[in-house]
Image: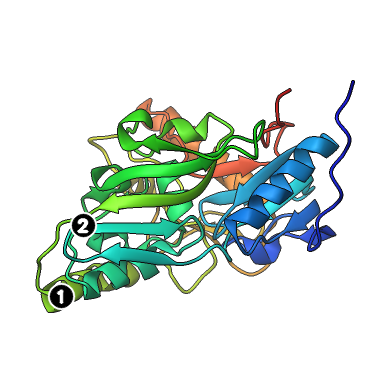
Amino acid sequence: MAAQATAQPSGVRQSVSLQAFTTWKVGGPAEWFAEPGSQGELIQLAAWAVSAGLPFRCIGAGSNLLIADGGLAGLTLCNRRLQGSHSDPHEGWVEAEAGEPIPTLARKVARAGLHGLEWAVGIPGTVGGAVVMNAGAQGGCTADWLHSVRVLDPSRPDQPFTLEARELDFAYRHSRLQAEPLLVLSARFRLAAGHDPAEITARTSANLQSRTSTQPYQQPSCGSVFRNPEPRKAGQLIEALGLKGLSVGGAQVSTLHANFIVNTGNARARDIDTLIRLVQERIRDEHGIELHTEVKRLGFEGVDTQRPGP
C-alpha cells in the first residue's frame, strides 16, 4: 500500500527561475523550489518530495553548475540559507553548515589562527559543494582537511548520518557524493591550531589577490570549467590553440583566463554547453586529450538529478 503523501511544507514555490541562483546567470525554471533555513526544514522538504514521488536535488551557491534552459522537474532545494559555523581554535576543529560560503569560512578560521583553508578563499562556492567536488586551489583541496560530513539519504530523509573522510573516495575533483544521491548537511574539518592569525590572514588575502588578478571575477562564470589533465593545465592547452575569445551566442572563452567561460550578458545555457563541447572537440583533435568538465550539468539529455528510491 502506497504511503500517504506528506502535506506540502510552507515556503515551497512553483515555477521559479533559477537564473538568479547560478553564478552563470542562466537556466530555466524549477518546477518546485524552496530555500530551507535549517537542517530540520531541509529534512522536512526532502520527506515531502519522497512522499510525493518528486525528483529533487540540492544546489548551493550555484557555481560549478549549468542548468538547462528548459529548467528542472521536481523539487530544487537551495541551501544557501544554511549558514553558520563554530570552531575550537585550541583543538583545531571547525564545523560548518552546508550552505556556508567557503570563502567566509576561510576568513573566519584565519582570524582564529587556524591553518588549512587559506587556499579556499577565492572559490565561489559553499562548504557542501566543496565537499562534493573536492574543491581545491593554490595547491590545497577539501580532502586534505576534511574530517567528516553529515549527510541525508533521500530515500530515508528522517535518518541523517555521518561519513568519515576516508569513506568518501576522494580523488582529484572527485568524491563518491557525485555519484550517490546523498545531500550534505554539514562538514567538520580538522585544521592546524596555534598559528599567528595575522600571518594566516595575510596568506589568505594574498591567495585571493592572486586569483582575482588572473581570473575574470567581474563577469558571470562558474569558475574553472575543465579539470586539468595532469600534468597539463587545461587553460594553457586552450590558450595555446588560440581559443581565448571564442564565442557562441553570449558565451565566451574568457580573454583573461582560458579555463573560464563567461556570460557576456545574454548567454543561454545552450550557448555555454555548445561552447564547452567545441573546446573539448578542438583539444581532442589537436592533442588527443579528453578534457573533462568540473561543471555539473542539470536538466540536459534527461539525466539531471536523483529520484528517491523505494
Amino acid of disc 2:
Gly
Pick the front one: 148 or 241: 148
**Quadrant containing the N terminus in the rendered view:** top right
Q: Position of residue 170 (x, y in %)?
A: 34, 33
| Circle 2 residue | 116
Residue 264 is tagged as none
The kind of secondary structure element at disc 1 is helix
Question: Toward the viewer: 130 or 197?
Answer: 197
For the residue pair 166 and 123, the one nearer the viewer reads as 166
Tell me which residue sits at (67%, 67%) in the image.
20
Total marks placed: 2
Q: Position of residue 248 (x, y in %)?
A: 62, 53
As drawn, 81 above or below 199: above
Q: Earlier in the sequence, mark 2 or mark 1?
A: 2
Which residue position is annotated with label 1?
197
- Left or right of residue 67: residue 53: right
Check disc 2 and report its element: helix, strand or loop: loop
Rendering coords of residue 94 (x, y %): 31, 59
Picture quarter with the C terminus: top right
Q: Is residue 1 left or right of residue 226?
A: right
Q: Is residue 30 visible?
A: no
Q: Which residue is at a point 35% across and 35% down the rendered structure image? A: 164
Q: In the rendered image of this protein, does residue 261 appear above or below residue 227?
A: below
Which of the 4 image quadrants contains residue 48? top right
Q: Amino acid at mark 1?
A: Pro
- Circle 2 packing at 10 Å, graded few (<14), some (14-19), many (20+), is many
Q: Is residue 76 left or right of residue 23?
A: right
- The alpha-carbon separation of the residues under discs 2 and 1 comes to 12 Å
